[in-house]
Amino acid sequence: MESTEQILFLGLGYIGLPTAAVAASKGLQVIGVDIDPQVVDTVNRGEIHIVEPGLREVVREVVRAGRFRAATKPVASGVYLIVVPTPFKGNHEPDVSYVEAATRSVVPLLKAGDLFIIESTSPVGTTDRMARLIFSERPELEGQLHVAYCPERVLPGNVLHELVHNDRVIGGIDEASTQRAMAFYARFVEGALHPTNARTAEMCKLTENSSRDVQIAFANELSLICAKAGINVWELIELANKHPRVHILQPGSGVGGHCIAVDPYFITADFPSESQLIAKSREINNYKAFWCAGQVKAAIQRFKVTQGRPPRVALMGLAFKPNIDDLRESPAKYIASKVMEGEDADYRIVEPNVREHSVFKLADYRKAYAESDIIAFLVAHKEFKTLEYRDDAVILDFCGVFKKQ
Ligand code: SAJ
C-alpha cells in the first residue's frame, strides 16, 4: 500500500519544488500545490521558475514520466508536506500565517493513518499548534493522524545533492508519528535520519542557523576592531585558526539570504531575555553592512575634498553571498542603495551573476574595476579574485577578495 501512496507538497518554492521533484525521481507519486497558477503552469510544462543547478532536468523527467504534477488546490493524499515560507513581520516576529493557511487547506482531506509533516522553518511549538488546530476541527483523528516536523537543511546552489545526502532531524508529536515520518524520509534520503520530538526538531533548525550567525558576528566584530587597530583581519584569522581548537569564520559585508539573517529572530521573538547573544549577533551583522556603507561614503567625501571632483566608484557584487544570483536580503544590495542615495558620484554597479536588474544598471566587472577611482568589494565572487590588485585606486575590500587590508 505504501508504494502507491500519493505525496502532496504544499509550496513549490526554493525548497518545496526540489524536494518534490527528488521524491518523484526516487519513484514516489507526487503532487505539488502552489497558490500561484503561473508556477503551477510552468511546472506542468516540465519547466521551473527558480534558479537551481540541475533542477530543470529532474523536473522535466518526473513530469514527463507522470510521477509529478502541480495543482492550485490540494487533493486527498497519504502524506502531506508543508513547505511554505515563514517570513517575519516588521517587528521581527515570525509570521506563521502561510503554514496555518496551508494546514487549514488540507484539514478536510485528512484521514486516519495519514502523515502530516511541516518542513517550513518555524518557531518552537508550531507543530503542536498545527496538530491542535487539526484535531480541534477533526477530533476523530486524534491519535490516528501522524504529525511531525522535519526541517530542510540544504544549501542553495547544492540543493539536489544535499536533499538526498544530508542527515535529517525528524521529530513527531508522539513516537508513532516520529517512526512513520522516519519511514517516509527513508524512501528518498540517503543521509542518516535522527529521531527526536517536534519541539527539539524545530529548535534544531533555528539553532543551526543561529550558530552560524553568531560565529559570523564574531568574525565581523573582529573586522571592526582590526580596522581601527590597523591589523589585517584576514591574516589575523588565518593565524588564530592555526590553533587546533579555533575555527573563526570569515568577515564580510554583513549576513544575508533568507535563512541565517532571519531564523535567529524566531528564537529572539519567543525568548527575548534568554537569547541576548543571538540578538546581539544579529545586530552586529546588520551593523556591519551599515558600517561598510559609511566607509564607502567617507572615501567618496575624502576624494571630493582632495581631488575637487566626484569620483568614479565601482560597487562590486550585489548577491547575498559569493557565486550565486540570489539578491534576497542582500547586504551588498543594501550597501549599494545606501551609498548611492547618500553621495553624488559616478557609479558602476557590478553583479556578474545577474544579466539585468530593475533598479541598478549593471556594468562589466573588468571595465568597472579598471576605470574607477574607488572600488568597494561587497561580495567575494570568484571573477573578482582574478583581478590584479590596483595600487593606484582606493580599494575597500570588505569580503577578502585580495586580503591585503
Ligand atoms: N557568510 C559570511 N562569512 C562566512 C560565511 C557566510 O559573512 O564565513 C555570509 C554569506 O556571505 C551570506 C550569509 O553569511 O551573506 C549566509 O550564507 P551561508 O552560505 O552561510 O548560508 P545560506 O543562508 O545560503 O544557507 C544556510 C545554511 N545553513 C547553515 O550552514 C547552518 C543551509 O544549510 C540551510 O539549509 C539554509 O541556511 C536554510 O535554508 O536555512
Image (spheres, rainbow, N blue to C red):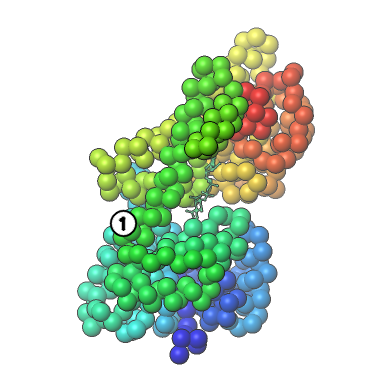
Q: Position of residue 88 (x, y in %)?
A: 38, 50
Q: Quadrant of residue 123?
A: bottom left
Left of 291 or right of it: where is 100? left
* Near-viewer residue (54 or 51): 54
**SS class, disc 1:** loop
How many marks overall? Answer: 1
Q: Within 10 Å of the Cα at label 1, are there few (<14), some (14-19), or many (20+) other Cα atoms?
A: many
| Amino acid identity at mark 1 | Val
- Image vertical order of residue 350 relative to residue 50, above or below: above
Left of 83 or right of it: where is 14? right
Residue drawn at x 39%, y 50% as measured from the top left:
207
Residue drawn at x 66%, y 67% as measured from the top left:
56
Q: Position of residue 101 (x, y in %)?
A: 35, 67
Q: Quadrant of residue 233?
A: top right
Q: Residue furthest front?
A: 244
Left of 52 or right of it: where is 125? left
- The answer to whether residue 291 is visible is no
- The answer to whether residue 181 is visible is yes
- Image vertical order of residue 346 relative to residue 3, above or below: above
Residue drawn at x 31%, y 41% as measured from the top left:
275
Q: Residue furthest bottom?
A: 1
Left of 49 or right of it: where is 82? left
* Near-viewer residue (181 or 318): 181
Q: Quadrant of the C terminus?
A: top right
Q: Position of residue 180 (x, y in %)?
A: 38, 77
Q: Which residue is mark 1?
A: 124
Residue drawn at x 73%, y 32% as measured from the top left:
368
Q: Position of residue 297 (x, y in %)?
A: 56, 22
* Near-viewer residue (313 or 220): 220
Q: Quadrant of the N terminus?
A: bottom left
Q: Is mark 1 within 8 Å of ligand 1?
A: no
